[in-house]
Image: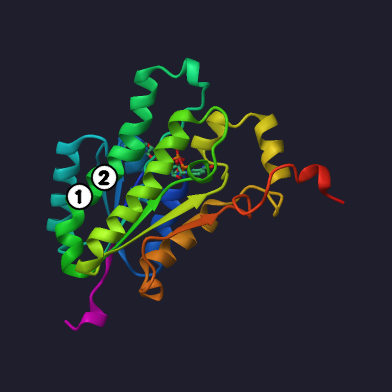
């Protein structure tokens, strides 16, 4: 088999729905095999059943032993790992004074520990393929906001962790980048976005709307592709312009 005829693979965590599922489908359309990782076994199996060239693996990315076993299973089944998308995430919005240590740890365990653990476990395989890592942060990791002490801090950690990974793994040919999505109407967002928050986002976003799962997925898939072969250590906001824009703009609109 020549290199160009090798069927590339990707691991997508949090693949049972939302941005992870859209990313899975875009990788499949490119001809990759995809390991779909999620801790929601029922939703994962229901989605995977309808797809070809996928390997669904039930795994909680915050649990080190489960992550090690998951990476071993994917490597054994696919024979290679070309991309790792650390997308699994949880959101929990609340004021600092009401954020118990347990709530803080729950957010950190998936959003930050999960990215560390999956990347560490996959590094030996990614070295063999000069693979790519894409971590999913959030605009909440780029700009502080009320109610996001745990979520925003976890995502800011993901942005810096990406830079650490790029700095250290670059010599193995591994690229690490980050996507910071703006609001997307997924189950995660709708659980914490009231109508008031939705209206405020529309005001604060130059494109005046939420993004779609596919609009985030296409940036992720691009960063994993050879078209981004000289891009590493970067965070790309896919956010309708939210991050680049100052505060107070709605009142200044014509
Ligand atoms: N939707 C948004 O507005 C938005 C904005 C910015 C960033 N994000 C980020 O995008 C990513 C995907 O979010 P989404 O909106 O598609 O959410 P979603 O809730 O629709 O999907 C997340 C998936 O991750 C899985 N998951 C959660 N914790 C897990 C764990 N510990 N182990 C394995 N699987 C786990 C869930 O079961 C679910 O299937 C998250 O990291 C989220 O923080 C989303």
Q: Quadrant of ligand 1?
A: top left
Mark 2–mark 1 CB contact (< 8 Å): yes
**Magenta stretch encompasses residue 5:** yes
Residue identified by numbered label 2: 116
Q: Cα distance, mark 2 to mark 1?
A: 6 Å
Residue at 56% x, 47% y: name it.
182
- Dot 1 lies on which element? helix
- Residue 236: x and y in percent read 49, 58
- In the picture provided, is 121 more to the left or to the right than 93? left
Where on the picture, by quarter, is residue 215? bottom right
Residue at 23% x, 43% y: name it.
117
**Closest to the observer: 236 or 49?**
236
- Residue 2: x and y in percent read 19, 84
- Residue 4: x and y in percent read 26, 81
Magenta region, residue range: 1-10
- In the picture provided, is 155 more to the left or to the right than 68? right
- Dot 2 lies on which element? helix
Q: Which mark is residue 13?
A: none
- In the picture provided, is 65 more to the left or to the right than 176? left
Q: Quarter of the image for the N terminus: give it.
A: bottom left
Residue identified by numbered label 1: 120
**Is residue 10 among what the camera can see?**
no
Residue at 30% x, 60% y: name it.
166
- Residue 35: x and y in percent read 27, 54
Q: Residue furthest right?
A: 254
**Closest to the observer: 126 or 215?**
126
Q: Residue furthest bottom?
A: 2
């Amino acid at each position: 088999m020549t290199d160009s005829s090798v069927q590339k693979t990707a691991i997508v965590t949090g693949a049972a729905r939302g941005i992870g599922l859209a990313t899975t489908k875009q990788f499949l359309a490119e001809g990759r095999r995809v390991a779909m990782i999620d801790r929601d076994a029922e939703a994962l199996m229901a989605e995977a059943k309808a797809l070809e060239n996928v390997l669904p693996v039930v795994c909680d990315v915050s649990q080190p032993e489960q992550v090690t076993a998951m990476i071993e299973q994917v490597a054994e089944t696919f024979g290679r790992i070309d991309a790792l998308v650390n997308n699994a995430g949880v959101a929990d919005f609340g004021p600092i004074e009401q954020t118990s240590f347990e709530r803080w740890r729950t957010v950190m365990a998936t959003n930050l520990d999960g990215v560390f653990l999956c990347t560490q476990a996959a590094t030996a395989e990614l070295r063999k393929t000069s693979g790519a890592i894409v971590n999913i942060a959030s605009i909440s990791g780029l700009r502080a906001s009320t109610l996001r002490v745990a979520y925003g801090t976890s995502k800011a950690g993901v942005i810096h962790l990406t830079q650490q990974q790029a700095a250290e793994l670059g010599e193995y040919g591994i690229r690490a980048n980050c996507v910071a999505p703006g609001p997307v109407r997924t189950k995660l967002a709708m659980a914490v976005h009231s109508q008031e928050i939705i209206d405020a986002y529309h005001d604060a976003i130059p494109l005046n709307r939420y993004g779609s799962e596919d609009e985030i997925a296409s940036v992720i898939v691009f960063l994993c592709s050879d078209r981004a072969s000289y891009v590493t250590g970067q965070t790309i906001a896919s956010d309708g312009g939210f991050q680049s824009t100052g505060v107070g703009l709605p009142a200044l609109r014509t």
